[in-house]
Image (cartoon, rainbow, N blue to C red):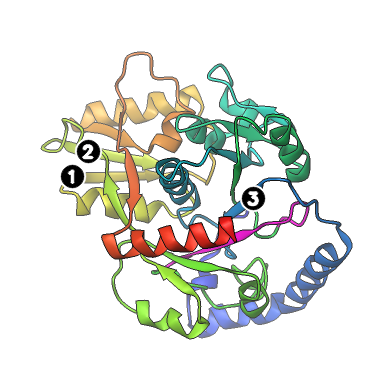
Amino acid sequence: MIESPKFWYKNNLYSKIQSFLLFPLSILWILISFLKKVLIKKYKSKLKVICIGNITVGGTGKTPFAIYTFKFLEKLGYKPVFLTRGYGGLLKGPIEVKDTHKFKEVGDEALLLNKVGPTIVSKNRSLGAKLIENHESDFNIIIMDDGLQNYQLKQDIKFLLIDKNLKFGNEFCIPAGPLREPINQALLGIDAIVLTGNESKDTDLYKVYNKIIFNPQIKTKKSPKIKNDKLLAFCGLANAIKFYETLKANGFNVMYTKSFPDHYEYKNEDIDKLILEANIQNLKLITTEKDYVKIKDDKNIINTLPIEMELDAKDKAILNSFLQEKLNG
């Protein structure tokens, strides 16, 4: 996982110089991406494929929105299944995720998705789709968690997730900036934009892209019994600040935070140090569900904050019409 350099999101002279020096490599990145897009033959699945992705390095809430879409489709009577590459896992697949699988085998996101519904891990997304087609009586829609830059499988509906706070950074491609592909190129095939994060400002800026826009809010599914306790919050996310802000926005008393790299593989000594530090400071530990699936917590010392995305009534109605038209058209 590429860590996000701070200069990607700063506008000072030093940051601009860094981006300028790396810009030739960004041109090479764009060229390679273009060649992949042109040369790789896409497989057209018998089933409808919904892709939920982004065009920036790091997290924008893809997995929570994939889970929301899964549950939404189930309520409409569809039989969806998740398809993910299993980032961080050793298994190439295609393979169906089981409760017995470990983080090292299929990755943290696959374990989290599997708690919601059937999940297939496949580094090669077209092979994953073919495996799902063998169970066509069980599933009729594939939900790709991430994959806008994956050219192996044709996608029927594409959602682009944008963090309202970080946006597109300096709008340069990797490594000069955070973009996986140029904005205009990415927008050509996008069906809808999903604005994530609890920031309410600047949402009108995205109307210039002339796409359907959804504006979900992050909600806590339930409140742990530690809301009045002092907390040490930790996580291994690309955008750790978002987790800490969500805790504070929901009334949790966060005293200290500890951030690890995205998709971090926790070691026993990491957890021992966190527990020791929390005990010394008389704090309770809290992390994300995504992090917790990678942690051995036999004594149930660590708390989690279960979160989910939610659309308001207006957006739900628009999403309903949008999906029905795309899936049945």
| Residue type pointed to by label 1 | Phe
Give me the C-alpha separation between circle 2 and circle 3: 44 Å
Residue at 52% from the left image edge and 73% from the top image edge: 168
Residue numbers of the magenta segment? 150-163
* Residue furthest out toward the right: 39
Element class at badge 2: strand
Find out whether the residues at labels 2 and 1 contact each other: C-beta distance under 8 Å: yes
* Residue furthest out toward the left: 228
**Crowding at label 1, few (<14), some or many (≥20) Cα neighbours within 10 Å?**
some
User: Between tags 2 and 3, which lies in front?
Assistant: 3
For label 2, the residue is: 231
Judge from the rendering whether residue 109 lies leftward or rightward of residue 173; answer left or right.
left
| Residue type pointed to by label 2 | Leu
Position in image of residue 305 (x %, y %): 30, 38
State the image quarter where residue 263 is shown.
top right
**Crowding at label 3, few (<14), some or many (≥20) Cα neighbours within 10 Å?**
some
Q: Is residue 152 magenta?
A: yes
For label 3, the residue is: 48
Residue at 54% from the left image edge and 71% from the top image edge: 8
Is tag 2's residue or tag 1's residue first in the polypeptide sequence? 2
User: Between tags 2 and 1, which lies in front?
Assistant: 1
Residue at 27% from the left image edge and 49% from the top image edge: 219
For label 1, the residue is: 252
